[in-house]
Amino acid sequence: MSKMNLLQAVNSALHTAMQQDEKVLCFGEDVGAFGGVFRATSGLQAEFGKSRCFNTPLTEQGIIGFAIGLAAQKQVPVAEIQFADYIFPAFDQLVNEAAKYRYRSGNEFNVGSLTVRAPYGGGINGGLYHSQSPEAYFTHTPGLKVVIPRNPHQAKGLLLASIADDNPVLFFEPKKLYRASTGEVPDESYLLPLGKAEVVREGTDITLVAWGAQVQVIEAAADLAAEKGISCEVIDLRTLLPWDKATLVTSLKKTGRLIINHEAPKTSGFGAELAASLQEACFLHLESPILRVTGWDTPFPLALEKEYFPNALRTLDAIQSSMDF
C-alpha cells in the first residue's frame, strides 16, 4: 500500500496497465515528456518509450479517431482529452463511431478496448471552458460506458477496470480532487467493478446519491443532517452508464426519500434520469418528491464559482425540505 493522491493513483493505474500489456498505449496533447497539463502521465514515456506514450496534434477529433483505429486493430489505446470541455469536437467520433462500431458490424468488429480519460468539473477557477461536467451527453448513448471516481483508491481500481473492459469507456476524473487529499492505494493491480454503486454510509431516513467530487459534498451534508437527528444513506454511483439501479432501488425503498447531487446544470442532467427511473420503480415507497441539488442552468462562471457549486448547505436544505414534506 502507498499513500497517493488521485492524480498519482491515475498515474499508477496507467503504469500498471502498460507494464501488464504491451498493447496499452497512452497518448494525447503534451502527455509525453511533459506528462500532460496535470502531470497524470509523468514518467510513462521515460519508462515505456515514445512508441507507447506520445504527444498528438492539438485536435480532439484526431485523437479519438486515431484511438478508434488503434482499438479496431486490437491495440489498447488510452487517449487523454486535456479538459473534458474539449471533448466536443470528438463527439461524433465517440457517439457515432466508437459506440456503434460493434453493433453495426454484427459483432464482427469492435473497438471495445478504447478508454478515453478526461479531467472534468470545476474547482480550479478555470472559468467556462475548463470547468464543465459533460457526462450526461454521453449517458444518452448505448455502446459507451461512463465512469467517474471519487478518491485515489477508486481512481486506480476503476481505471484499470475501464482499460480491461471490452467496451469503450469514458473515464472522467474530477480535477479538483487531483491533489486535494491522499489515501491508501494498493501498489499491485486490482479491479473495481464497473456498473456497481457503493454504499459509502448506511442510513434509514433519506438516501443521498452523487458521483465524483460531489460524494464528499453529500458526506458533509450527511454529517450536518446527523446533528439534526437525520440518518442519511450515502451512495457513490461510480458508473453512470450502465448505472446500478438495483442498489438505489433497495436504498430508496428503505428510506422513502432521495436527494441527487451533481455539479452539472439541472436541466437534462443525469439526475433527471435517476429521478425518473427511480420514481417508476419506487413510487409507492416514496415519502416525499425526489429532489435534485445541482449546478445552475448557466455557463460555468469564473468569479462566482463557489456560488455555482451544489454545496453541503444547499444539500442540507434539500434534506430538511424532504424530511418536512
Image (cartoon, rainbow, N blue to C red):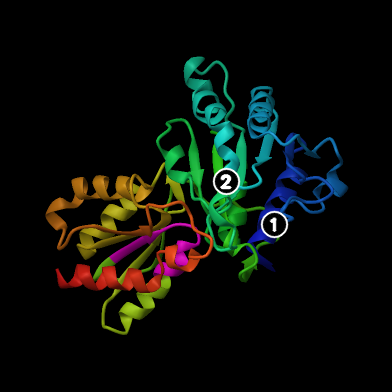
Where is residue 180? Give x, y as percent: 61, 69
- Name the foreground residue: 84 vs 167: 84
Q: Reply above or below: 118 against 316.
A: above
Q: Position of residue 205 (x, y in %)?
A: 24, 71
Which residue is drawn at the image coordinates 58% and 52% (left, top)? 130
The residue sitting at the bottom extreme is: 227
Find numbered disc 1 in the image and state the secondary structure of the residue it sits on. loop
Dots 1 and 2: beta carbons under 8 Å?
Answer: no
Percent position of residue 220, x then y: 42, 74
Residue 3 vs residue 243: left or right?
right
Q: Is residue 96 left or right of residue 28?
A: left
What residue range appears in magenta?
A: 207-218
- Say which of marks 1 and 2 sits in front: 2
- In the image, 303 versus 19, the foreground residue is 303
Quadrant for residue 325, please give it: bottom left
The stretch drawn in magenta includes residue 71: no
Helix, strand or loop under label 2: helix
Q: Is disc 2 surrounded by few (<14), some (14 to 19) or many (20+) residues within 10 Å?
A: many
Q: Percent position (x, y) of residue 163? A: 62, 41
Number of marks present in the image shown: 2
Looking at the image, residue 207 lies above or below residue 36 = below
State the residue position of label 1: 188
- Residue in view at x 50 percent, y 62 percent: 213
Residue type beneath disc 1: Glu
- Residue assigned mark 2: 84
Kind of residue indicated by mark 2: Ala
**Residue 165 visible, this angle:** no
Structural distance between the alpha carbons of marks 1 and 2: 29 Å
| 224 with respect to 100 (left or right) | left
